[in-house]
Amino acid sequence: MEESGCSREEVLSLLAGHRARDVPHNHIFSSMCTVPHDLAVTAHELFVSTNLGDPGLYPGTADIERKLIASLGDLLQGKNVGGYATSGGTESNLQAIRIAKKLHPSAKPNIVVPASAHFSFDKTSDILGLEMRLAPYKEGGYTVDTDAMAELIDENTVAVAAVAGTTEYGVIDDVVNVAALAREHDIWCHVDAAFGGLVIPFMKNPAPFDFAVDGVSSITLDPHKMGMSTIPCGTLLLRDPEHMKLLSVDSPYLTMKTSFTLTGTRPGADVAGAYAVLKHLGRAGFRDIVSGCMENTRRLVAGMEAFGYKTVLDPVMNLAAFHAAEIPDGWKVSRTRAGHLRFVMMPHVTRDVVEAFLEDVSRLH
């Protein structure tokens, strides 16, 4: 740290130089985050100094958080759901399993999750001292084999999980059967819909995955993904608000004397941004956004197949996977554990971006 500070202009110039080294969004196919909506940015600036870790000082911001949870709970067909705004899917998944562990005390607790489970479940198991058991894919697909999952459940299992919009292939587990297993064994059922939660409800004939499914206890949903809020904004949604009490600890020196969140200080800015986008777009607006993303996904698939690239499976949502092949320089495309090319068709991946990419692909052939 220098003795004397720099001028505002010098600092901004320095920062701009670093920002220029980042990959521009119009060349990113690998991320489940996107450019925030301009209204989210405005709302973020308005609430940038708020701290939901001490909500008694910011009652207006705290009310926005409650409205955000209520709006998303309604979208996911819940009634009077509980929950709070988290730092993202990792925290949401951790807190859901933390509740499950408290509800089902065991000397050797375990959770049973799909092979597609996000790596946050590895962190969760490590932090909470749980054994994580991986249920394999169904033969010939990338959704969980619920029969195999049933075989992994025993008297020490505290929770089962399903994924609605898997990170690698964008498919939806059989949540109905996973939830049925939870009911049968009287354990927690968590659905990780960090990505799919703001996609699936706006698709035609969507697969059941939310609180309309009997037995689903909690859902992870990240507005900083398809919700186009500022980063980081995740949410944990609970069917029964009373389960929030299981996360409670004393916070005697704050305006609220108990705290149930994982982190202490929590920004209100991203929460305001997320709620602003929900209010502005409504269901119709999100339906249009998802429709556009799906249309661009189909265009990408058609274009890639014309050049001989082979899809791993027909896209279920706005994520396409192809068998390994060459990709033009300058484009950020990720690979799955199996080595498949993975394209996430977020709102920043416009038709122009798709066409520019396909034009570069054409030069390889």
Image (spheres, grey):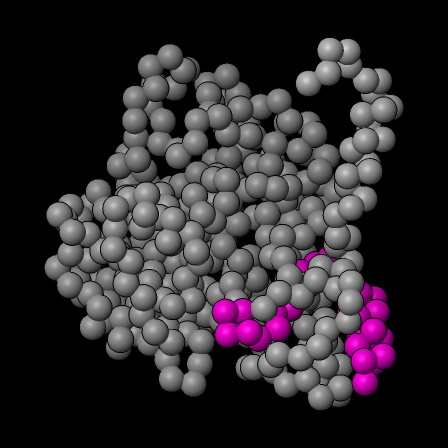
Q: Please indicate whether residue 84 sits to the left or right of residue 195 in the image.
A: left
Specify whether residue 342 is painted magenta. yes
The answer to whether residue 262 is above or below residue 134 is above
Please identify the quadrant where the C terminus is shown: bottom right
The answer to whether residue 245 is above or below residue 125 is above
Q: Residue furthest front?
A: 2
At 78% from the left and 67% from the top, the residue drawn is 329
Q: Please indicate whether residue 23 sits to the left or right of residue 311 in the image.
A: right
Q: Position of residue 214 (x, y in %)?
A: 30, 62
Residue 242 found in image quarter:
top left
Q: Please indicate whether residue 133 sits to the left or right of residue 316 in the image.
A: left
Residue 141 found in image quarter:
bottom left
Q: Position of residue 239 (x, y in %)?
A: 34, 49
Residue 97 seen in the current view: yes
At 68% from the left and 84% from the top, the residue drawn is 309
Span shown in magenta: 336-365
Q: Position of residue 341 (x, y in %)?
A: 62, 73
Please identify the quadrant where the N terminus is shown: top right
Q: Please indicate whether residue 166 sits to the left or right of residue 78 in the image.
A: right
Between residue 131 and residue 343, name the one nearer to us. 131
The answer to whether residue 250 is above or below residue 234 is above
Between residue 26 and residue 14, name the one nearer to us. 14
Between residue 238 and residue 356, name the one nearer to us. 356
Residue 288 seen in the current view: no
At 43% from the left and 56% from the top, the residue drawn is 119
Specify whether residue 322 is painted magenta. no
Residue 340 found in image quarter:
bottom right
